[in-house]
Amino acid sequence: MLAPPLILAQSESTVYNLPPYFIWVFGLLLIAGGLGWLVATVLGFARARAFGLSTRWFALAAACMILYHAHWLALVFSINSENGNIIFPVLASLNFFVVLGAVCTIVGFARLNSLPQGDASEL
């Protein structure tokens, strides 16, 4: 009965020190992921004419992943801002573009009927 108030009365806090490589690895992977999804989006929309409407849905999913990476940048800038109230809405909606990209991919797979005209061995 006395333990919970005593636990809450403790004043020690745990501080985690980031390793020196964390920012560089996180930043480089964020940039590489954004550039990779940018290439996928451009190639997807370029190939959409040849392969049909389902390819556009996959390109839209890649565009959602670009917005997901941009959302991480928005989170970093909101953390560094003086207004701390903006952090939680940005953090709460972090995976919105991942969900939207998944929906676009599901629609793309649902509309994918068959291979385009030609032989499957050409792929």
Image (cartoon, helix red, strand yellow):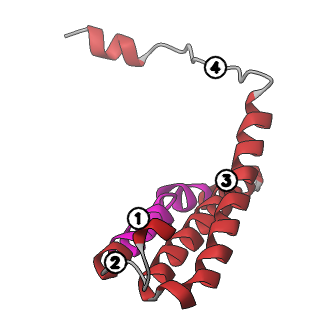
Label 2 neighbourhood size at 10 Å, few (<14), some (14-19), many (20+)? some
Which dot, 1 or 3, sits closer to the camera? 3
Chain-order first, disc 2 or disc 3? 3
The amino acid beneath tag 3 is Gly
Q: Residue 117: give x, y in percent of width and height.
A: 42, 86
Labels 1 and 3 touching (C-beta < 8 A): no
For the point 68% across and 59% down, the residue is 36
Name the residue carrying label 4. Answer: 15
Classed neighbour count for the residue bearing mark 3: other residues with Cα under 10 Å, few (<14), some (14–19), many (≥20): some
The front one of 68 and 60 is 60
Q: Which residue is mark 3?
A: 33
Q: Residue at x 36, y 11 (%)?
A: 6
Q: Does the magenta run of residues contain 47?
A: no
Q: Earlier in the sequence, mark 3 or mark 4?
A: 4
* Dominant secondary structure of the residues highlighted in magenta in the image: helix
Instruction: Locate residue 111, reporting x and y percent.
Output: 32, 82
Closest to the camera, between mark 4 and mark 2, is 2
Instruction: Report helix, strand or loop for mark 2.
Output: helix
Marks 4 and 2, Cα distance to the nearest angstrom?
A: 44 Å
The answer to whether 13 appears left or right of 116 in the picture is right
Amino acid under label 4? Val
Looking at the image, can residue 86 be seen? yes
- Above-or-below relation of 87 to 123: above
Stretch in magenta: 87-106
The residue carrying pointer 4 sits among few (fewer than 14), some (14 to 19) or many (20 or more) residues within 10 Å by Cα, namely few
Which badge, 1 or 3, comes first in the chain's sequence?
Answer: 3
